[in-house]
């Protein structure tokens, strides 16, 4: 049992040398985190640094491959979320998962509803407690309404209410403020502080440094699945933390070349869908990479889907080089030169059980058909061109796509779309789940394509990627574009500020 | 469900009435009443003869039991297609017990039928919960497997009314205050299941798992156990229905209950149980069962040709699903718009 210097007893939560791999992908290799009671501990790192994996291990959702996990000095091995919960750990996830058909009250109490001695749920007591909880959080949500259709902010509030009502000793908040307004954040912080003063331990994961420094006592930095440092918040600075988080030269990773910028190709104006996004207007020029930044749930992927014609929209228009793109007609969009590389390549971008050649030629299959037949000779010939241009690393063109690495899968999706000879490429999270080396390759490829006159709209949650690659950055927050920032003015601070604060003026 | 975005009315009676009128079950109940009224106008004997009234209650009683079990499984986002075969097996077991164990007490036969049904349900549940294969596939397999066992066991034998004790067969026709015993049993089961599904943790967890399995995992609910319980409950209720089937019809061959699974799923769907789980009630499924079988009896009286009767039932099922979908779309649109309003 280790006792940290300067504290009276064992740490509320301690992880040492924790490792976790998924197949060949190493998510964590040496993670450390020590959280004391009566403290709020910040956990920071870039997307993909392994924070969420660590949280899931603490929550009992994943089991660690190696390392120690101690709770109040005792080793624990959670095999389920129920065990973690029973030990007094509550986790508020980045993207809340609620029961859409059930009422807000039931969502808070599911699995532990107060009952009388006949096993009958005491609805009155349940409702009274929810009202008290909401009163304490100063929020107004109808406890009887179904969880379906709640905003992310409200869903977070429900998660927080749940954790408080669980009386958890260790509270882990995975970007709880991501979708909250300023007032809501202040309210949450007041509650967090009072929970700390009651003797609980809190772990706070956030990308907003102003919040981290305003709220937390300690800060741990992670990078590429490894522990970097832990400091008292007074002994460090934002600049120092950012340097440790990034830990490498940004320009190396993002070989952005300056391309001549031509005419407007993609023009989107006034696009709206009730409940998802509102009045989205922007344009992308030939040779230009426009970054679309924002937090998870801001509505970026939804905009992309509507532009491409997968989903319907209520108002607005999309046009390519002046020609109106019809609604809800992806085939017409493709014919006009629009290509969409979706966020979830395994589900939406690839047929993972099919071959590299078949996947590469899927979007141009029609043109390969000769006298009504699609021959593998034709497929392979077309696929070979693109596979070699994009340097897809595979043994054979008839290899099953699902067996390739994430980076190579992404190249196959790109190849599929580039084969259609598009004029506009919308790419959603181009490097999610791809190792650093291949990331740079994908970035180089995007730069090259822009250089050849392709108009690229790049949706990305990775700030360095947006800053490194984009000629212009659009920022969305809660379904609206809140800022348009030129490459020269784009910094982590300006983009993050626009992504997290409601703003009326476009800078 | 009554969890809409309505503020509780000051008057409890009015509030209760509002909930009743908005409930999905109400529309199906009104449809049932409409069918009964129209048919009775055409032929008063449909309701007002003693036989007519008895048939109205008696015919759907066995299906109600199976539909209640089916509803519990569907609410948990599964489906049990093997109920027809399960009913066949338990009905045949009932007859066999009377033949092979002379003088066996009737209550023991009931318990044996229920237990056997529960075991068959457990097999379904275990395959679904542990093998992680969709219930549709598993229970389609056990539909054939259970029926195969039945054929193997019964061969071309048939159990006749004369093979079973008189007082057992009497259960199929006994009435109290002109309400058939079978209907009373179905009602008791319905009330108990309805209470359980609405008022207990276990019942609410069925809804939770069906509504969002990923969230159920995160909440630490015992998903595997719940799925097992749902299938066991469905099997046990079908087992009970099998025993009652033997008492009511008196003749059991190896094909008893075949095709019943479709009636049971149809009853649940018509009664507003969402086919993807998470919403609906056993009450709705029960009313759906009554509507389904009452329509079947009403159509000949109304002069609809035999040929068209199945089509009418089909239209009813599709209509119910389309209605549900429209209501769900309207609801989610309304919720999204109210959210936009509060944001602006």
Image (spheres, grey):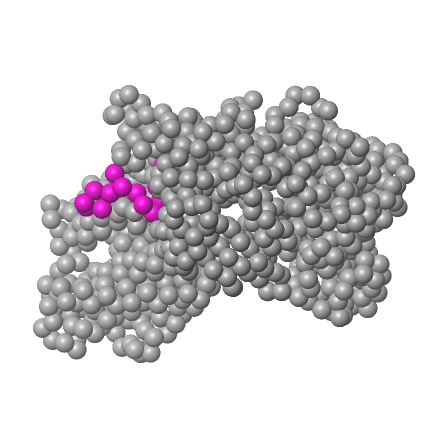
Q: Quadrant of residue A355?
A: bottom right
| Residue B60 against residue A504 in the figure, above or below | below
Q: Main secondary structure of the magenta part?
A: loop
Could you tell whether A397 is left or right of B41 in the image? right
Is residue A109 within the magenta segment? yes
Q: Quadrant of residue A91?
A: top left
Q: Quadrant of residue A263?
A: top right
| B218 or A387: nearer the viewer | B218
Residue A397: x and y, percent? 76, 67
| A152 or B101: nearer the viewer | A152
Is residue A103 within the magenta segment? yes
Residue B162: x and y, percent? 15, 71
Q: For the point 41% across and 43% down, which residue is it?
A: A37
- The magenta region covers A102-122
Could you tell whether A53 is left or right of B287 in the image? right
Q: For the point 79% across and 49% down, which residue is it?
A: A252
Residue A15: x and y, percent? 49, 55
| A90 or A142: nearer the viewer | A90
Residue A466: x and y, percent? 73, 41
Could you tell whether B99 is left or right of A389 in the image? left
């Amino acid at each position: 049992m280790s006792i940290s210097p300067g504290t009276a007893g064992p740490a509320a939560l301690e992880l040492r040398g924790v490792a976790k791999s998924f197949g060949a992908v190493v998510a964590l290799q040496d993670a450390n985190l020590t959280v004391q009671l009566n403290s709020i501990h910040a956990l920071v790192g870039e997307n993909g640094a392994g924070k969420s994996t660590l949280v899931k291990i603490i929550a009992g959702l994943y089991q660690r491959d190696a390392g120690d996990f101690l709770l109040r000095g005792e080793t624990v091995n959670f095999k389920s979320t129920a065990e973690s919960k029973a030990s007094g750990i509550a986790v508020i996830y980045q993207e809340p998962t609620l029961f859409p058909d059930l009422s807000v009250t039931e969502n808070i109490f599911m699995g532990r509803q107060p009952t009388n001695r006949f096993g009958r749920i005491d609805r009155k007591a349940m409702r009274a407690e929810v009202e008290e909880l909401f009163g304490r959080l100063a929020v107004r949500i109808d406890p009887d309404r179904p969880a379906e259709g709640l905003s992310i902010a409200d869903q977070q509030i429900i998660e927080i209410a749940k954790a408080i009502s669980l009386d958890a000793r260790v509270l882990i908040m995975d970007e709880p403020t991501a979708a909250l307004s300023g007032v809501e954040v202040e309210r949450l912080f007041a509650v967090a502080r009072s929970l700390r003063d009651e003797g609980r331990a809190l772990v706070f994961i956030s990308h907003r440094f102003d919040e981290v420094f305003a709220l937390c006592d300690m800060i741990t930095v992670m990078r590429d699945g490894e522990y970097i440092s832990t400091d008292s918040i007074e002994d460090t600075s934002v600049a120092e933390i950012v340097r440790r988080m990034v830990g490498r030269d940004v320009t190396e990773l993002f070989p952005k070349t300056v391309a001549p910028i031509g005419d407007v190709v993609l023009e989107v104006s006034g696009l709206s869908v009730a409940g998802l996004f509102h009045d989205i207007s922007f344009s992308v020029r030939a040779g230009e990479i426009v970054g679309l930044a924002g937090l998870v749930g801001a509505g970026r992927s939804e905009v992309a889907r509507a532009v491409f014609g997968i989903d319907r929209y209520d108002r607005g228009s999309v046009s390519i080089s002046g020609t109106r793109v019809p609604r809800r007609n992806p085939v017409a969009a493709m014919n006009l030169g629009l290509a969409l590389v979706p966020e979830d390549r395994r589900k939406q971008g690839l047929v993972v059980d099919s071959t590299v050649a078949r996947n590469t030629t899927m979007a141009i299959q029609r043109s390969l058909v000769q006298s009504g037949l699609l021959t593998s000779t034709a497929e392979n010939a077309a696929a070979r061109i693109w596979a070699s241009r994009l340097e897809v690393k595979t043994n054979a063109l008839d290899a099953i796509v699902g067996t390739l690495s994430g980076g190579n899968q992404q190249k196959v999706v790109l190849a599929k779309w580039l084969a259609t000879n598009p004029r506009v490429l919308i790419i959603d999270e181009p490097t999610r789940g791809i190792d650093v080396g291949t990331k740079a390759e994908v970035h180089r490829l995007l730069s090259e394509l822009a250089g050849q006159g392709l108009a690229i709209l790049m949706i990305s949650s990775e700030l360095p990627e947006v800053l490194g690659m984009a000629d212009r950055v659009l920022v969305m927050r809660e379904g609206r574009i809140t800022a348009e920032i030129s490459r020269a003015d784009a910094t982590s601070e300006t983009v993050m500020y626009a992504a997290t604060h409601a703003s009326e003026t476009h800078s | 469900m009554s969890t809409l975005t309505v503020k509780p009315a000051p008057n409890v009676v009015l509030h209760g009435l509002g909930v009743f009128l908005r409930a999905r079950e109400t529309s199906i109940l009104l449809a049932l009443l409409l069918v009964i009224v129209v048919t009775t106008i055409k032929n008063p004997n449909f309701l007002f003869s003693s036989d007519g009234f008895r048939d109205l209650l008696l015919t759907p009683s066995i299906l109600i039991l199976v539909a209640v079990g089916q509803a519990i499984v569907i609410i948990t986002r599964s489906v049990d297609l093997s109920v027809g075969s399960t009913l066949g097996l338990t009905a045949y077991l009932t007859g066999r017990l009377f033949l092979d164990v002379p003088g066996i007490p009737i209550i023991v036969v009931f318990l044996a039928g229920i237990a056997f049904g529960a075991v068959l349900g457990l097999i379904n549940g275990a395959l679904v919960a542990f093998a992680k294969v969709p219930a549709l596939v598993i229970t389609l397999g056990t539909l054939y497997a259970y029926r195969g066992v039945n054929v193997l066991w019964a061969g071309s034998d048939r159990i006749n009314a004369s093979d079973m004790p008189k007082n057992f067969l009497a259960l199929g026709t006994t009435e109290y205050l002109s309400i058939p015993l079978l209907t009373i049993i179905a009602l008791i089961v319905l009330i108990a299941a309805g209470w359980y599904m609405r008022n207990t943790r276990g019942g609410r967890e069925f809804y939770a798992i069906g509504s969002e399995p990923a969230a159920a995992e995160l909440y630490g609910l015992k998903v595997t156990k719940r799925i097992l319980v749902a299938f066991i409950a469905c099997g046990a209720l079908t087992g009970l229905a099998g025993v009652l089937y033997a008492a009511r019809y008196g003749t059991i061959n190896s094909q008893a209950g075949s095709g019943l699974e479709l009636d049971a799923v149809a009853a649940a769907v018509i009664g507003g149980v969402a086919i993807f789980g998470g919403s609906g009630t056993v009450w709705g499924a029960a009313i759906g069962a009554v509507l389904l079988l009452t329509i079947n009896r009403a159509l000949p009286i109304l002069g609809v040709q035999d040929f068209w009767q199945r089509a009418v039932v089909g239209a009813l099922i599709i209509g119910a699903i389309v209605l549900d979908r429209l209501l769900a779309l309207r609801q989610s649109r309304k919720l999204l718009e109210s959210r936009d309003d509060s944001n602006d």
